[in-house]
């Protein structure tokens, strides 16, 4: 958390909404919760799935230079020797309580944070990796670690992918998965937890083209957040200072987001040089080079790594979408979530519980569920039901009224503008598909009652 810019939304409001509406709960809450672990409820799991799907679509599905991977969480312990995690994280560490930079206690001259002057935690011999044992015997030889990042799975599979996916440089491997870090300090809701999910790309390039691809990925990743609705003014790129750079990095930028507690890292984009493949080749004794047919040479590719957090993205999307306004003279809370991210895309709301209306509404509900996550709600006044949907970011509500029984049309109401259009039931799927893909929602009805 760097400079202090006034927060636009209190974290308490986000936490309260998440708990109240079933996005996110403290882990094992009935036992008093488990520090910095969180459970995603019925709406949270949809939001997270949508974030991952949007990322996968941009990173893998729509590209021909990228393939996916799902490596296991437990890896051969030598992986962590080669990567530097075993050694790198076994120093006496102190962490600054305000900017969260970590320092080796034995290398510090003073007693406060060299970067911002903040108070430091007590030094501890600390390895951020969670340790466990493989098999029935708890002895040193059976120690394994929960991965602290998904990246290593992609490095150790470099040759496997190269041999099977028929890719030439430049190409990338993408992966989404859980990572675990025994963080010294946690907090700020899901911003920093001990179990979290990452969405990482390892993009392998010819050494001389590293800068070009580094710049490319900075723009690409920044724009991904903007396309999904995050306001540009709440995002910024921040280059790491030399002393901040991780041991493997040649260059690194963070995409920072203006969270309620201030600017903080949302995603890191690093130029890792050839560090990882060189290290894994050395420790495994395997050849991890690439044969360049243009120059007839074996080379060790450089790696550009955009590394994002699913949970931090979820928090950023929620904070950015949060809003309060006046609708029909009443205060309403709403989430302006991008339709691709909204947990529920459409809500079906019959105006009354009269049998004939319910039958038609249920039929529409069953039909739309084939395509999207749809919610059905017939409890309380229509105004209350609209508010409930606005608060969870549902882009469209469909109202079925008595007129619908006669003219076979229903009303679609849009969350942000409150505009309404009347649409024939048989056109509903087509219209919703277009609207969910971003087609304008004009006040002018597309169809009138009599066609
Ligand atoms: P920080 O400086 O905030 O601890 P980091 O620089 O250690 O983060 P990276 O190693 O670059 O993080 O991890 C890449 C991404 O993974 C981060 O940008 C973040 O989105 C996510 N991430 C890392 N650690 C955590 C955590 N403890 N909780 C939630 N997300 C995390």
Image (cartoon, helix red, strand yellow):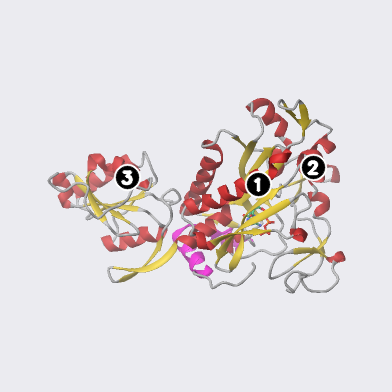
Residue 384 relative to residue 198: left or right: left
Residue 405 lies in the magenta-colored region: no
Residue where numbered disc 2 is placed? 77
Q: Position of residue 146 (x, y in %)?
A: 72, 47
Q: CA distance from mark 3 to mark 1?
A: 38 Å
| Mark 2: C-beta under 8 Å from nearest atom of ligand 1 | no
Secondary element at tag 1: helix
The correct choice, above or below, for 370 with respect to 324 in the image is above
Secondary element at tag 2: loop
Residue 30 lies in the magenta-colored region: yes
Residue where numbered disc 1 is placed? 214
Marks 2 and 3: CB-CB under 8 Å? no
Which residue sits at x=56%, y=65%?
259
Residue 299 relative to residue 319: left or right: right
- Camera-side residue: 104 or 355? 104
* Image quarter of the C terminus: top left
Residue where numbered disc 3 is placed? 432
Mark nearer the N terminus (2 vs 1)? 2
Q: CA distance from mark 2 to mark 1?
A: 30 Å
Mark nearer the N terminus (3 vs 1)? 1
Which residue sits at x=60%, y=62%?
33
Mark nearer the N terminus (2 vs 3)? 2
Q: Position of residue 99 (x, y in %)?
A: 69, 68
């Amino acid at each position: 958390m760097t400079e202090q810019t006034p927060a636009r939304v209190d974290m308490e409001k986000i936490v309260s909404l998440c708990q109240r509406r079933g996005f996110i709960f403290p882990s094992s809450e009935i036992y008093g919760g488990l520090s910095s672990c969180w459970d995603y409820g019925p709406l949270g799991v949809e939001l997270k799935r949508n974030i991952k799907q949007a990322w996968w679509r941009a990173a893998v599905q729509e590209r021909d230079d990228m393939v996916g991977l799902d490596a296991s969480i437990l890896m051969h312990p030598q992986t962590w020797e080669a990567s530097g995690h075993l050694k790198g994280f076994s120093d006496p560490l102190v962490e600054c309580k305000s900017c969260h930079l970590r320092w080796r206690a034995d290398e510090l001259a003073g007693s406060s944070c060299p970067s911002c002057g903040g108070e430091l935690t007590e030094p501890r011999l600390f390895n951020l990796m969670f340790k466990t044992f493989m098999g029935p015997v708890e002895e040193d030889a059976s120690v394994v670690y929960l991965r602290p990042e998904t990246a290593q799975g992609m490095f150790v599979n470099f040759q496997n992918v190269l041999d099977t996916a028929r890719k030439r440089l430049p190409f990338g491997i993408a992966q989404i998965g859980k990572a675990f870090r025994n963080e010294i300090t946690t907090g700020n809701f899901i911003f920093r937890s001990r179990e979290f999910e990452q969405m990482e790309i390892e993009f392998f390039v010819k050494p001389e083209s590293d800068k070009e691809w580094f710049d490319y990925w900075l723009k690409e990743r920044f724009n991904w957040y903007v396309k999904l609705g995050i306001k540009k003014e709440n995002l910024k790129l921040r280059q790491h200072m030399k002393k901040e750079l991780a041991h493997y990095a040649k260059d690194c930028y963070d995409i920072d987001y203006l969270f309620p507690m201030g600017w903080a890292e949302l995603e890191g984009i690093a130029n890792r040089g050839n560090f990882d493949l060189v290290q894994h080749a050395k420790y495994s004794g395997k050849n991890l080079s690439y044969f360049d047919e243009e120059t007839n040479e074996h080379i060790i590719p450089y790696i550009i790594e955009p590394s994002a957090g699913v949970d931090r993205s979820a928090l950023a999307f929620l904070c950015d979408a949060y809003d309060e306004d006046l609708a029909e003279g009443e205060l309403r809370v709403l989430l302006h979530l991008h339709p691709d991210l909204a947990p529920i895309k459409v809500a079906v709301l019959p105006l009354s519980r009269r049998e004939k209306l319910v039958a038609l509404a249920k039929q529409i509900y069953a039909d739309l569920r084939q395509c999207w996550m749809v919610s059905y709600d017939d409890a309380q006044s229509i105004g209350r039901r609209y508010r409930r949907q606005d608060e969870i970011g549902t882009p469209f509500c469909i109202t079925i009224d008595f007129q619908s029984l006669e003219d076979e049309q229903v009303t679609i109401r849009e969350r942000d503008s409150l505009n309404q259009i009347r649409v024939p039931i048989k056109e509903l799927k087509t219209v919703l598909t277009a609207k969910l893909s971003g087609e304008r929602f004009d006040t002018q009805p597309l169809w009138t009652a009599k066609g």
